[in-house]
Image (spheres, rainbow, N blue to C red):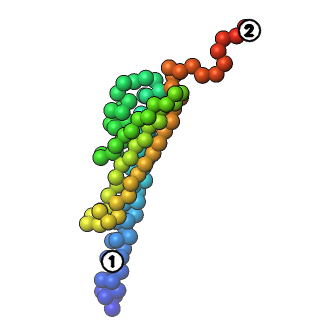
Amino acid sequence: MVTAETAVALPALVLLAAMLIWGVMAAAAQIKCVDAARVGARAAARGDADAVAIATAAAPPGASVQLVQEAETVRVTVVAPCPGPGRLGAALSVRLEATAVAAREDVISGPTGGDV
């Protein structure tokens, strides 16, 4: 009887373990997306010409990076696919996204000039 119970419970435990591992991997990929967006935004705010390349290097594999320069800010968005575990990869795939905004350092904002 113990063998039959084990045969029924073991596949469920294996599936649960696989889903937990996939969840941890997805969380780690999300953190990489956030870090990549921050690094790219800081680089673009400083005026680095290769800010997209810097963000792409820090992003998870297969991620796309978009840089938008506005009047006083730069916005970097990182989008990465995160496939599910094993054969369920396509069915359980999620899209991870992170955005970071930084003030441009080459733009002077606030009051200018004036007597002290």
Judge the density around disc 1: few (<14), some (14-19), many (≥20) Cα neighbours within 10 Å. Answer: few
| Residue 114 picture location, percent across and down | 70, 10
| Residue position marked by numbered label 1 in the rendering | 10
Q: Most extreme residue toward the front, as rendered?
A: 71
CA distance separating discs 1 and 2: 77 Å
Q: Nearer the viewer, mark 1 or mark 2?
A: 2
User: Which numbered circle lies on residue 113?
Assistant: none
Q: Assign the N terminus to one quadrant of the image.
A: bottom left
Q: Nearer the viewer, residue 69 or 57?
A: 69
| Residue 10 picture location, percent across and down | 33, 77
Q: Residue at the location (35% across, 55% down)? A: 82
Q: Residue at the location (34% across, 71% down)? A: 15
Q: Does the image show residue 57?
A: yes
Under mark 1, the amino acid is: Leu
Which of the 4 image quadrants contains residue 86?
bottom left
Marked residue nearer the N-terminal end (1 or 2): 1
| Residue position marked by numbered label 2 in the rendering | 116
Q: Most extreme residue toward the top, as rendered?
A: 115
Which of the 4 image quadrants contains residue 115?
top right
Q: Residue at the location (66% across, 11% down)? A: 113
Judge the density around disc 2: few (<14), some (14-19), many (≥20) Cα neighbours within 10 Å. Answer: few
Q: Assign the C terminus to one quadrant of the image.
A: top right
Q: Most extreme residue toward the right, as rendered?
A: 116
Q: Seen in the image, is 17 located left or right of residue 106?
A: left
- Mark 2 secondary-structure assignment: loop
| Residue 77 picture location, percent across and down | 43, 41
Tell me whether the residue at label 1 lies in contact with that at label 2, contact meaning CB atoms closer than 8 angstroms.
no
- Mark 1 secondary-structure assignment: helix
Q: Does the image show residue 39?
A: no
85 in relation to 47, above or below = below
